[in-house]
Image: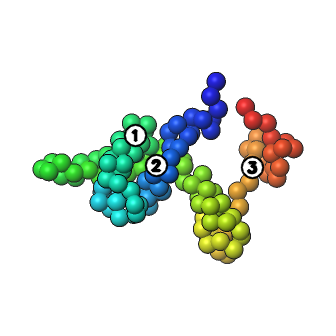
Amino acid sequence: MTSGLDAAMARVGDRWTLLVVEALLDGPRRFSDLEEAIPGIAPNVLSARLRRLERDGLVVAEPYSQRPPRLEYRITDTGRELAGALALLARWGAGGGAEDDIGPHHRSCGTPLEARWYCPTCDVVTEHTDDEGHWL
């Protein structure tokens, strides 16, 4: 049996795929827009990642021109579920300190938001997964 992390890594487990997803979180983009948004990605790598993301249901390609054939890419609702994980990874990668300007902020006061484990059944926020959490 594979773990959830194994399954996630099989779908988006490389640098370029996560960067493509991040770029599409801002809205639909054309291929050339994605190339600009992701410096250093080779066109063949971008094409392969987009095809795989489309196959996995994380991205949808919609034609905007028939001659020559041109596509616009947008993230699906399933792909958008990665936004929280990407924000946490970006914050961690930037150093993870509260002073970092990366990640979601509270709209009212501007303070960076922190991730917490929450049990909706018990309505409890758990600080330490080692104490109360159980991985299935």
Q: Nearer the viewer, residue 125 or 19?
A: 19
Element type where label 2 sits in the image: helix
Q: Residue at the spot x=74%, y=54% of the render?
A: 116
In terms of image quadrants, where is residue 52?
top left
Q: Which residue is mark 3?
A: 117
Q: Which residue is mark 1?
A: 52
Viewer can see residue 77: no
In terms of image quadrants, where is residue 37?
bottom left
Q: Residue furthest left?
A: 67
In terms of image quadrants, where is residue 103?
bottom right
Residue 36 position, x and y percent, is 35, 64
Badge 3 density bin: few <14, some 14–19, many ≥20, Cα 10 Å: few
Q: Residue at the spot x=40%, y=60% of the render?
A: 40
Element type where label 3 sits in the image: strand
Q: Is residue 11 left or right of residue 105?
A: left
For the residue marked with disc 3, what is the amino acid?
Trp
The circle drawn on residue 17 is: 2
Q: Nearer the viewer, residue 118 or 49?
A: 49
For the residue marked with disc 1, what is the amino acid?
Arg
Q: Residue at the spot x=65%, y=71% of the render?
A: 100
Q: Nearer the viewer, residue 52 or 121?
A: 52
